[in-house]
Image (cartoon, grey):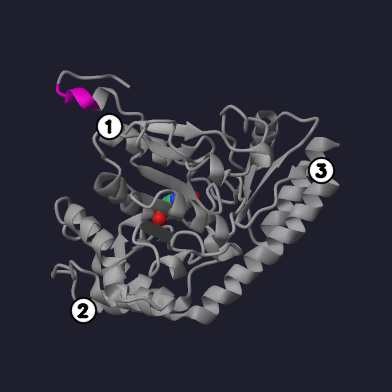
Amino acid sequence: MSPSPFWSPRVHGLVPYVPGEQPRLANLVKLNTNENPYPPSPRVAAAIQAAVQQGLQLYPDPDSTLLRQAVAAHHGLAADQVFVGNGSDEVLAHAFFAFFQQRGAPLLLPDVTYSFYQVYCGLYGIPMEVVPLADGLRVDVEALVAPAGVEVAGVVIANPNAPTGIGLPLASIERLLQMHPGRVVLVDEAYVDFGGENAVGLVAQYPNLLVVHTLSKSRALAGLRVGVAFGQSPLIDALERVKNSFNSYPLDRLAQAGATAAYEDRAYFDEKRAAVMHSREGLSLQLEDLGFEVLPSQANFVFARHPSHDAAGLAARLRERGVLVRHFRQPRIAQYLRISIGTPQQCDALLQALSEILR
Ligand SMILES: *Cc1c(COP(=O)(O)O)cnc(C)c1O
């Protein structure tokens, strides 16, 4: 990085997010960024082709009306309780801007979680109150409280958590909502469709709940960039105000058409997420047979460590064999590998490479 006098002063202080590697090499077993190993519903490509025919010379619907209606119908909500954005990362960024800039009050978040939350705090100048996970790398809801005498800006958690995969029951989410009635509790459910309990049904009851979903994982559309937020209409209005102060057209015509088709194909969605969950259970057992300790996952990845092999070394040796997994050089989790659930063939290739390395 070479700073330049052209930069605004605040650019010098930014600490950007580092995404998992997207190598251009073919034939890699890519288990490092939690993409879905299956392609999206065939209806997605058909809808995108139809959208191309309809004409790309025209701007898209700035309100993504048909998509929001399809998402709302899927979850039994009204369209004004649904916000959509260019990937859930953009939705999260707008939510941080809209709800967590509270006159210097800190945002509560766990120490081990999706690392983009800290990046957005840096971008918007939001102080943080980082709360350590409890034993077993579990989120301790009771510990997500303000220090004595301090008002907080809100709470953000991922449920299931990333990169641990461990989920909280809905009762814990309700407890969190009741502990912070005057602030937004943001629940990022990027992985909830792989066996977690989703909090969308609590929206009607809790005006402080914002739930965020993505089409990148369970709907296999990481390349299309679509994310969703659910909340009561005053929260959604705030997100609309931020969005319309930033970009009127975050979702292009292809994204709106493809995402709508993905929500309409519920049978395909259920079939593929069941396949991923099935593979996860098999892979977890086989990793345990190789001596790994595997955290209980409700996501499309497992988080595992080997008692006698260094995680960074394992990741490097897997890479030499064409298998990519994710390793985080971070306190407390530096001995873990995060392994995305692949197809059965990809899981077998991973296990084969690991058993060679461990032999
Ligand atoms: C993948 C992921 C996201 C980002 O999803 P996009 O919609 O692709 O931007 C957000 N939160 C968590 C916890 C994730 O794992």
Identify the residue under disc 1: 104
At 78% across and 42% down in the image, what residue appears? 292
Q: Which of the labelled discs sits on residue 346, or is there none?
A: none
Residue denoted by label 3: 355
Q: Nearer the viewer, mark 3 or mark 1?
A: 1
Q: Does 45 sit left or right of 288 as displayed?
A: left
Taking the magenta stretch, the answer to whether it contains residue 302 is no
Q: Are marks 2 and 3 in contact (CB under 8 Å)?
A: no
> How many numbered marks are there?
3
**Image location (x, y in percent) of residue 180:** 41, 49
Side of 350 where 231 appears, left or right: left
Q: Report the side of 179 relative to 280 (left or right).
A: left
Residue at image point 29% right, 74% down:
79
For the residues labelled 3 and 1, the Cα–Cα distance comes to 51 Å
Q: Answer yes or no: do the residues labelled 2 and 1 have beta carbons within 8 Å? A: no
Is 211 placed above or below 74 here? Answer: above
Q: Earlier in the sequence, mark 3 or mark 1?
A: 1
**In the image: residue 70, left or right of residue 331:** left
Going by the numbered disc 3, the residue's amino acid type is Ser
Q: Residue at x 51, y 54 (%)?
A: 175
Identify the mark nearer the N-term, 2 or 1.
2
Above or below, 39 relative to 117:
below
**Gap between marks 2 and 1 measured at Cα:** 48 Å
Q: Counting other residues with Cα less than 10 Å from the Cα at mark 2, is it few (<14), some (14-19), or many (20 or more)?
A: few
Q: Residues within 10 Å of mark 1 (few under 14, many from 20)?
A: some
At horizontal 41% and vertical 45% (from top left) the residue drawn is: 155
Callout 1: SS: loop
The answer to whether residue 192 shows anywhere in this view is yes
Residue 54's tag is 2
Q: Quadrant of the C terminus?
A: top right
Start-end of magenta stretch: 6-10
Q: Secondary structure at mark 3?
A: helix
